[in-house]
């Protein structure tokens, strides 16, 4: 029988990419497979939590004992996450949410011509920032996917978005980031401590993240 340190806790996890349509047949997206977020949802459920997973489009199956809600765009993810936020104890935002979407979504397929084409983009809502602003007693965990200056950008996100923990991955490293079964992360906590982990499976990364969250919960009491 496994230890269930998250019994009685509700956990909200986001995973996968978002897709932002430009016309009925085309969209903008990114390389997120959902593996990192699904691993977190699975481990949180194993540890006894009641887990809601808000997932962008992926090829993965819902983990056992997890309530999975599928969404497409950043806006849909935002609305779904906000619905659950107030009644959630722990939020872990591993999704790769689009920062921009096409300003105009065409009803009909865009026709090609011989000219260059420009698609105007507008900002999406920053979900994590909104959660930080509306935070009451929740533990808020963000990710930072960076290609350079990882530590500086990660600590910046921790402060600016009012997070308790940030999981930083340098997505240019072999065995880290998008699509792989492994990740290489450093966990930065609000109390100033950090934990640098070697390359490990996304499930083991998920266990380490949850263990840091449990420490944070214990210190809050
Ligand atoms: O899905 P996999 O293939 O397993 O890959 C895992 C991963 C690389 C996607 C994951 O480890 C990861 O780093 N996820 C965060 C990706 C990301 O969008 O990082 P960011 O630095 O752009 O965003 C920072 C944080 O803000 C993230 O927690 C993100 O969910 C959040 N965000 C971003 C934009 C936005 N509009 N709203 C948000 O909430």
Image (cartoon, helix red, strand yellow):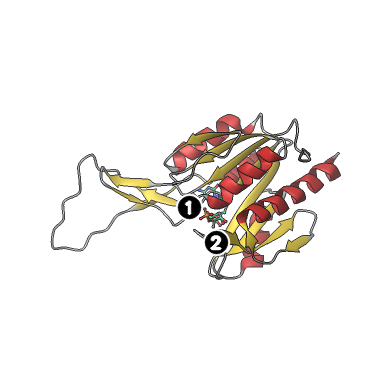
**Is 172 rendered above or below residue 203?**
below
**What is the C-alpha distance between the residues marked 2 and 1?**
10 Å
Is residue 197 visible to the viewer in this orientation of the structure?
Answer: yes
Q: Residue at x 43, y 55 (%)?
A: 30
Q: Are marks 2 and 1 in contact (CB under 8 Å)?
A: no
Tell me where residue 187 appears, x and y as whole percent.
Answer: 70, 58
Name of the residue lying farthest toward the left: 114
Residue linked to disc 2: 177
Q: Residue at x 66, y 48 (%)?
A: 141
| Label 1 element class | loop
Q: Is residue 112 left or right of residue 178?
A: left
| Label 2 element class | loop
Image quadrant where one finds the N terminus: top right
Q: Residues within 10 Å of mark 1 (few under 14, many from 20)?
A: many
Q: Nearer the viewer, residue 147 or 9?
A: 9
Q: Nearer the viewer, residue 32 or 119?
A: 32
Q: Is residue 218 left or right of residue 209?
A: right
Which of the two labelled residues, at mark 2 and mark 1, occupies the earlier sequence position? 1
Q: Residue at x 81, y 48 (%)?
A: 215
Q: Is mark 1 within 8 Å of ligand 1?
A: yes
Image quadrant where one finds the C terminus: top right
Is residue 135 visible to the viewer in this orientation of the structure?
Answer: no
Tell me where residue 190 appears, x and y as whole percent.
Answer: 76, 53
Q: Is mark 2 within 8 Å of ligand 1?
A: yes
Say which quarter of the image contains residue 112.
bottom left
Tell me where residue 58 appears, x and y as whole percent.
Answer: 45, 46
Residue linked to disc 1: 33
Mark on residue 129? none
């Amino acid at each position: 029988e496994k230890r269930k340190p998250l019994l009685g806790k509700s956990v909200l996890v986001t995973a996968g990419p978002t897709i932002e349509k430009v016309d009925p047949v085309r969209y903008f997206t990114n390389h997120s497979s959902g593996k990192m977020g699904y691993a977190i949802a699975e481990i949180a459920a194993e540890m006894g939590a009641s887990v809601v997973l808000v997932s962008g489009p992926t090829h993965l199956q819902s983990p056992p004992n997890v309530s999975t809600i599928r969404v497409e765009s950043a806006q849909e993810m935002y609305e779904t996450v906000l619905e659950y936020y107030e009644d959630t104890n722990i939020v872990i935002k591993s999704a790769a949410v689009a920062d921009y979407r096409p300003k105009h979504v065409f009803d009909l397929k865009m026709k090609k011509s011989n000219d260059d084409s420009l698609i105007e983009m507008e900002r999406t809502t920053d979900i994590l920032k909104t959660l930080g602003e509306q935070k009451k007693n929740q533990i808020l965990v963000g990710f930072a996917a960076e290609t350079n200056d990882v530590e500086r950008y990660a600590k910046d996100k921790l402060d600016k978005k009012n997070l308790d923990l940030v999981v930083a991955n340098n997505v240019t490293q072999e065995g880290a980031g998008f699509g792989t079964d492994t990740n290489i992360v450093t966990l930065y906590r609000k109390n100033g401590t950090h934990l640098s982990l070697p390359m490990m499976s996304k499930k083991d990364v998920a266990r380490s993240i949850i263990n840091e969250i449990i420490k944070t919960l214990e210190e809050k009491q």
